[in-house]
Each structure stands twice: as C-alpha cells, then as structure tokens.
Image (cartoon, grey):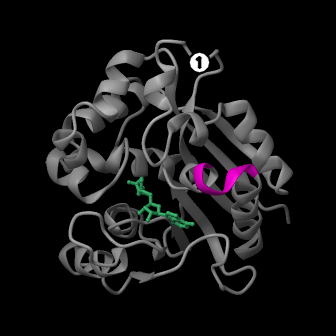
Amino acid sequence: MNNFIYYKSAQYTDIDVIYEQCSGPGGLRLADFMAGKMALQHGSRLLDVGCNRGFQSCFLAKEYGVSVMGIDPWDDRMNGDPMIEHVRRNADLWGVSNMVLAQKAGVPETNFAAKSFDFVYSTTALEMVRGLEGEQGYLSCLSEILRILKPGGVFGLGEPMHLDVPLPGDLEPYVSQGDFPWKECFRDLKSTVADVKRAGFAIIEADYAPDAWSWWMEYATHDPFCKKAPDEDPKTLEVDNGRWTSFGYVIAKRPE
Ligand SMILES: C[S@@+](CC[C@H](N)C(=O)[O-])C[C@H]1O[C@@H](n2cnc3c(N)ncnc32)[C@H](O)[C@@H]1O
C-alpha cells in the first residue's frame, strides 16, 4: 500500500464479503479514496452511477453522511435479482435506509431533472458503456452527468485504465476476450481526461491511483467470479504483471 490513508474503510476488514458485494477492483477502499478526493460534504446529495449492489453507496452514506441515489440498469449475475433490490437490502443492513435510494436506470437516460446533484460518483461502470457503445456512447454518459450536476458540483470518476504504454503483444489475446474485452473498454488517463473536458467539465485532479495494482490483485483473489474462473481475469492480470492494466481517477467540476 502507498501513502494514502484509508481512514474510514480500514474498519471493514472482511475482504471476501466486500468483493462479493462490490464488483471490480478496490471495493470500499476505492470508495474511500474517491470520497477523499471529491471532498464529500456531510448532508449533500450524491448520485452513484452503476451502483451495483449498493455496498459503496451505503458506505458513503454511513461514513461520509451523504444522501445517495444509486442507479443501476442491470440484474445481478449471481441470483438474477435487480441490483436495486440488493441496494435496498444492503441499506437496511447498513442502517442507512433513510439515506440511500435506488432506481433501475442508467446513463445516458437517467430522466433526472437538470442540476439535481451536488456530487456524482461512478466507479468501474462507464468503461463498460464504452465497450458496448463506443466513444460516442461514453461521451453521451459524461454529458448527461454534467447536465444533472448542480453548477459547481463535483464528478468523481474511477475507472480501470491502461498505462500510457503500447499494449504488450503477449497480453493482447487476453485483453481481447470475453463480453467486455478490456482492450475495447480501457483507455489511458490522458484520453479519459480529454473526454471529460470535451463533455464540458473543468478538471480538478486526475491521476493513476497509487494503489491500482494492489486493488487489482485483491480483485483477482477475492472476487467470486475470479475465484470461479481463474483462467479469465486472474490469468490476464498474471500475464500482465503490472505492465499495462491500471486504475485511474478524474475529479472534475461542472463550471458555475
Ligand atoms: C463492474 S460494476 C461496478 C460496481 C461498483 N461501482 C464498484 O465499483 O464496485 C458496474 C456496474 O455498472 C452497471 N451499469 C452497466 N451499464 C450501465 C449504465 N449504462 N448506466 C449505469 N450503470 C451501468 C452494471 O449493472 C454494474 O452493476
């Protein structure tokens, strides 16, 4: 681990449960990292785009005192329930049902009124839209997020990204497979920042996360789908060995 101190997530130590309830690298440490970077304010209203089972939404509500609306359009791969039903159950378990709501919806068609949120948080979700809908689809999601943020509101984007290096030839077959080939979904930091700017945001800070590789290693070891299919993402990460795959973040503001 690098020098970032996970003040609030350090108390949540059951890493298997965290990776069962989240989806992707980082889990609650990612949410904690992003909350710090976004400077979340107690009592403000946050939209979690691609909230999955809402574990991060509940963490942000409980530990940072924000009211969360989670949106997720998909059903759970594990038991077929809509993600939003998991969100409601998790909100009960976390004791934050008065602070966390969920809707079965997604970007770019959220149907929220313009200027509805103080903060929008999205981790490991929009790159999947890029994989499905291409760069134009990704940009439409960013434009929608800008529209529903209040002027001066903050967007925190945390995303699997690749380093600014050529894709190693021996890795290419591994990142070209599956329903969401990483080669199609992941971009480098520079290109992601350019997209966020193009959508009309002002960049506050952007970088690769210092703990990116340790989050990926945790994911490879603890994610239930990785446990079931070690020849898929865990194998890709083993072959990669930190040469190409990373995780970046962009903190941006809707101009006043
Ligand atoms: C890999 S999970 C990430 C969940 C969580 N944010 C995390 O970091 O652990 C991505 C989620 O994005 C959701 N998703 C897919 N397409 C979406 C869209 N167009 N808008 C919002 N969410 C979407 C999926 O249903 C899935 O739950």
Looking at the image, can residue 202 be seen? yes
Residue type at mark 1 is Leu
Q: Quadrant of residue 76?
A: bottom left
Q: Report x, y in % for residue 166.
A: 64, 15
**Helix, strand or loop for disc 1:** loop
How dense is the environment of label 1, judged by Cα within 10 Å: few (below 14), some, or many (20 and up)? some
As drawn, is 151 to the left or to the right of 148? right
Residue at (31%, 63%) from the top-left corner?
55
By secondary structure, the bulk of the magenta-drawn segment is best described as helix
Which residues are drawn in magenta? 131-135
Which x, y percent locates residue 27?
33, 48
Say which quarter of the image contains residue 212: top left
**The C terminus sits in image quarter:** bottom right
From the viewer's side, name the closer residue of 173 and 237: 173
Q: For the N terminus, which image quadrant?
A: top left
Could one spot residue 1 in this view of the protein?
Answer: no
Q: Is residue 90 magenta?
A: no
Q: Measuring from the top left, give residue 147's x and y in whole percent.
A: 77, 73
